[in-house]
Image (cartoon, rainbow, N blue to C red):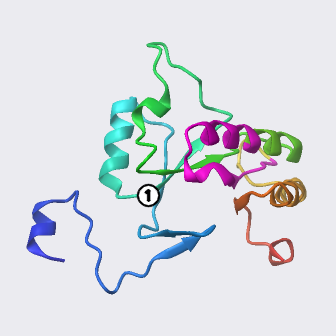
Amino acid sequence: MSMSTLDNPHETPITGQDEPLFIGGRMLQSRLIVGTGKYETYEIMRDALDASGAQVITVAVRRERLFDQQGRSLLDFIDTDRYTILPNTAGCFSAEDAVRVARLGREILDQIDNPGKDWVKLEVLADKKTLLPDPVETLQACDDLLNDGFKVLCYSNDDPIMAV
């Protein structure tokens, strides 16, 4: 790492040793995917995303309010030209619900022409306490979404049979 990078922590060095990552036909230099939830304010979220160097950020479509108490939208604080937004089906407990939420995310991102519109971070949960995935519902949702043209990044456990 060069001294100038140490002086400027917001500068992300890209060296010949860094290999790009390809996901869903897109080339990414950063392997870090950052979420948009649980920040105290939208301003803190925006600054954290900027400092992270991430190119892809997740948005939980089902959990996101359209506007906050001040009438502001989460998307007002995200540079949608800079970041690929990865819609997330967090909070879904059935394949049907996850597919509906993924399609809603696609419609929103299509309106702003964000390249993440055909991507989805698929989560179909079985248990609210442990947040473990439901393998049967996840597989059904994955099949439905793939048939609908989505690039699916699936939240699952390490079951090799289900992974096939």
Asked if residue 59 lies left or right of residue 124, the reply is left
Q: Which residue is mark 1?
A: 55
Residue 60 visible in the current orientation: no
Q: Secondary structure at mark 1?
A: loop
Position of residue 162 relative to residue 44, above or below, is: below
> Which quadrant would the N terminus be assigned to in this image?
bottom left
Position of residue 149 relative to residue 112, above or below, is: below
Asked if residue 99 lies left or right of residue 151, the reply is right
Q: Nearer the viewer, residue 161 or 82?
A: 82
- Is 120 in the magenta? yes
Residue 36 lies, in percent from the top left, at 49, 42
| Type of amino acid at the residue the image marks with label 1 | Gln
* Range of magenta residues: 102-126
Q: Nearer the viewer, residue 95 or 131?
A: 95
Residue 10 lies, in percent from the top left, at 23, 57
Residue 9 lies, in percent from the top left, at 19, 59
> Which quadrant would the C terminus be assigned to in this image?
bottom right
- Is 50 in the magenta? no
Residue at the spot 85% in from the left edge and 53% down from the top edge: 141
